[in-house]
Image (cartoon, rainbow, N blue to C red):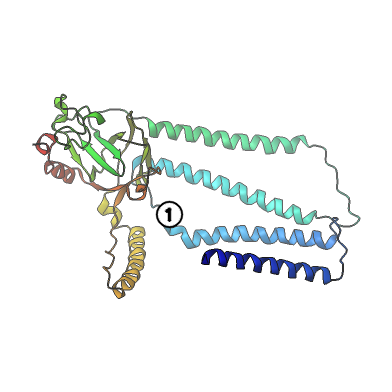
Amino acid sequence: MTVLLILTVLVLVAISIWQITKIFELSQPKKVNTQVADDDDNRWNGQLMFAFLIFIYGITLFSFWKWGDVMLPSASSEHGIEYDNLLWISFAIIFFTQTITQGLLHYFAYKFRGEKGKKAFFYADNDRLEAIWTIIPVIVLAGLILYGLYTWTDIMTVEENEEALVVELYAQQFNWKARYAGDDGVLGDANVRFLQDFDGKNLVGIDATDPNGFDDVVVQELHLPSGREVIFKMRSQDVLHSAYMPHFRAQMNCVPGMITEFAFTPTVTTEEIRQTDAMRAKVKKINKIRREKSEALLAKGEEPLEPYVFDYLLLCNKICGASHYNMQIKIIVETQQEFEKWMNDQQTFAEFIQ
């Protein structure tokens, strides 16, 4: 009842304000209202166009200065360098073209604004101009498309080889699991129909009839050796997920009922990227914010936030449900020796189900 009363009062107040506004308008001397713009109107419009041009350039430069440090650092994978090159070339061409076209657009809007007594010059056509603004964009776009196609083909071509490490990524709402091949170097067959085998211990549905699966290793923290190609085979238990590893410039959908693949070679270990100047500055900035929030939490008698330490992450880049935001696991990139030592400490599937 109270809510209804408040809404009624607000509606009545709004009606009163509207009535007062109309009375004020009617009490004013009538102004000549014409739909034809005069010289003052045109001058103001031209100046406003220039002001808007300055604004969009200014806000662009300010954004780079203010938030440039939140961009991803250099890629931590071999193919990521190609990807970044394509991105920055495309961005440079777009920014260059946008700067010229927007500058000319706003300049002409001011220079050729309407003035009393001035007549517009009718320019029927110009074959040379039309050829220039048609051929140049075609050449530039064709170059970008061919370069992008070459880069895409090079990145997406997955070739099986004995030196590569094969890892299965298993997605489900709302966590990831990784499966490594054992000493035989072969992943066993798997299917979601086998998830309930061995009293629910079969976390990724390994087929017990396939002997290659018993030495497989299932973990919830992804370890990758630096300098060695990793071939990911991706499955989903329930809905569409997307394996996203931003620092490696890698993303691939995980589709229920099928296996998708992606491969890359990590080049920067976790410890190495933590020691870079850019990452040190980022961690320092984040921890400053966390300390300020911790002081407020302590004042309320709550637990403070833990200091932030950078780690590579595997995220889900599809909105897959209520806890999508928290679907992530840590990625540790280390030397081959450290990776082998870690693998030796893990339980095989056969040991886990006993």
Residue 134 percent location from the top left of the image = 67, 35
Task: Please indicate, yes or no, whether residue 191 appears anywhere in the rendered image.
Answer: no
Name the outermost residue toward the top: 209
Residue ID at (48%, 35%):
148
Residue 284 percent location from the top left of the image = 33, 65
Q: Residues within 10 Å of mark 1 (few under 14, many from 20)?
A: few
The reply, left or right, for residue 43 in relation to residue 93 is right
Q: Which amino acid type is marked by label 1?
A: Met
Residue 161 percent location from the top left of the image = 26, 28
Task: Please indicate, yes or no, whether residue 341 appears anywhere in the rendered image.
Answer: yes
Instruction: Please give the residue where the numbered disc 1 appears in the rendered image.
Output: 71
Quick check: 203 above or below 88? above
Residue 257 percent location from the top left of the image = 33, 28
Residue ID at (83%, 38%):
124
Q: Nearer the viewer, residue 247 or 269?
A: 247
Q: Nearer the viewer, residue 217 or 248?
A: 217
Q: Exactly how many numbered labels are in the figure? A: 1
The reply, left or right, for residue 42 in relation to residue 212 is right
Quadrant of the rendered image containing residue 176: top left
Name the outermost residue toward the front: 1
| Helix, strand or loop at mark 1 | loop
Q: Nearer the viewer, residue 108 or 182?
A: 182
Name the outermost residue toward the right: 117
Quadrant of the rendered image containing residue 4: bottom right
Residue ID at (47%, 41%):
86
Quick check: 28 above or below 217? below
Residue ID at (46%, 58%):
68
